[in-house]
Image (cartoon, rainbow, N blue to C red):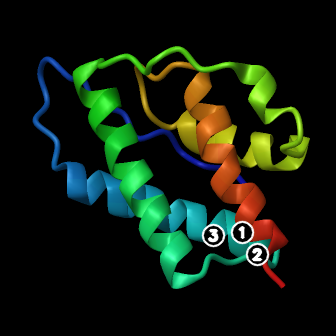
Amino acid sequence: MNISPLRFNRLEDVIDTETVSQKLLAMIGKVLAAEDAYTTDVQQQMLASHVKAMVKRAQTGEPLPEVDISLFDEVSPDSINMAAKIVETLPNLAVEEVYLLSVHFEIARSNP
């Protein structure tokens, strides 16, 4: 699946965090549907909260606290790749965002 980047210049553009978050959630929904995966209502709420915070970090350049990547050793490469496709659509995000988002994909893919 080809995903176009959501580009904005945080110094010049004022973005609506909610609008960008909804676009990302729609992209994530398509990626999950292509894998026959889904989120429960509670999982979707947690995902939406994470995505909104991620968009804010992309906009403001706020860094993440240090993340130990080894904590994600059990997350499948497929989930990490799906998360990377989403994270790469936004500027100014640390690679750790991929790992944090990948957990949501891993959980959605494990739903019966």
Q: Examine the rendered structure and indicate whether residue 45 appears above or below residue 51.
A: below
Comes first in the chain, label 2 or label 3: 3
Mark 2 vs mark 3, foreground winner is 2
For the residue marked with disc 1, what is the amino acid?
Ala
For the residue marked with disc 3, what is the amino acid?
Lys
Residue 30's tag is 3
- Horizontally, is 98 left or right of 49 in the view? right
Q: Quadrant of residue 69?
A: top right
Alpha-carbon span between mark 1 and mark 2: 6 Å
Mark 1 vs mark 2, foreground winner is 1
Residue 37's tag is 2
Q: Where's residue 75, x and y in %?
A: 84, 44
Comes first in the chain, label 1 or label 2: 2
Comes first in the chain, label 1 or label 3: 3
Could you tell me which secondary element the residue under label 1 belongs to?
A: helix
- Report crowding for label 2: few under 14, some 14 to 19, many 20 or more residues within 10 A (C-alpha): some
For the residue marked with disc 2, what is the amino acid?
Ala
Q: Do the residues labelled 1 and 2 touch (CB within 8 Å)?
A: yes
- Horizontally, is 67 left or right of 112 in the view? left
Q: Where's residue 28, x and y in %?
A: 58, 61
Could you tell me which secondary element the residue under label 2 belongs to?
A: loop
